[in-house]
Amino acid sequence: MPSDAKHRPVYVISVAAELVDMHPQTLRLYERKGLIRPGRSSGKTRLYSERDIEHLREIRRLTQELGVNLAGVEEVMRLQHELDDLQGEFEAEIERIEGELREQARRPEALPAEGGRLDPRDRPVYVISIAAELVDMHPQTLRLYERKQLIRPGRSSGKTRLYSERDIDHLREIRRLTQELGVNLAGVEEIMRLRHQLDAARLGLESNVRRIQEDITERMTKLRTLPQGEAESDLDPETGEGDSL
């Protein structure tokens, strides 16, 4: 989980319930459903963070303002938690790479591996008729979902809609939400907005990590090509580290 103050557990259940205008028993129900994940004190007392409070307010908005059923709310909050966890993974990965950079500065002969490549599942390949057949929907339904921004197909140079494997996954998820879980369209819009946000966050994480790795590679390559005396002069005399990123 991210380490900023918003995620620090500070509120006991009575205070958290008052902040969101709910009964404490409702908060316990939401916890059993996995909608919120409060921390615990050393004495096992529930403690809620500012982020938990935001999640509880979001649950109230979904249920009271948008009329989303509990199955839809569970999907929304699962994605919210995935986003929170991804942020934590990003911070941990950056910390790992910074440690790698410090180690590489001490051993400039070792170079990190190349970064990853774009996920082929994001490559737009299917025209709308094929995509509709793959998910057992009418092409007009796919156009409606695009207008609602539930899916975001690519375009060919001739402006033809082209759908990727990830788009197909999203369409199947929409069908599951509506047909199996009975989630209304407002709930589906919230869920798919978060799915797109999660996809973008993952791509951003991969891109940032790759950029840092490439920067490490470039720095280490320069150190390897410098004469020994100059390479050593680029390192901190006390720590053995190079210039910071």
Image (tube, grey):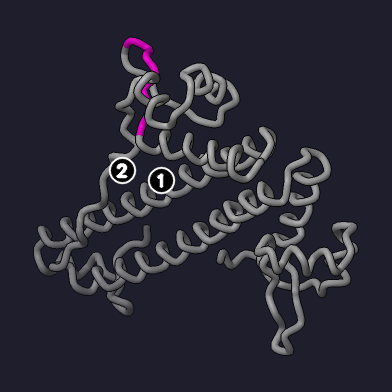
The local secondary structure at tag 2 comes to: loop
Residue 89 can be seen in this image: yes
Amino acid type, residue under disc 1 in the picture: Leu
The magenta-colored residue range is 158-164
Quick one: 11 or 139, which is closer to the camera? 139
Q: Residue drawn 42% across and 24% down?
A: 132
Q: Determine whether 142 is above or below 23 in the image.
A: above
Image disc number at residue 119? 2
Q: Residue drawn 47% across and 38% down?
A: 172
**Residue bearing the label numbered 1:** 203
Image disc number at residue 189? none
Say whether residue 155 is magenta.
no
Q: Determine whether 170 is above or below 154 in the image.
A: below
Disc number lying in front (1 or 2)? 2
Q: Tags 1 and 2 in contact by the CB under 8 Å rule?
A: yes
The local secondary structure at tag 1 comes to: helix
On screen, residue 232 versus residue 173, left or right, reads: left
Q: Determine whether 57 is above or below 45 in the image.
A: above
Mark-to-mark CA distance, 1 and 2? 9 Å
Quick one: 190 or 54, which is closer to the camera? 190
The percent coordinates of residue 84 (x first, y second) are 57, 58
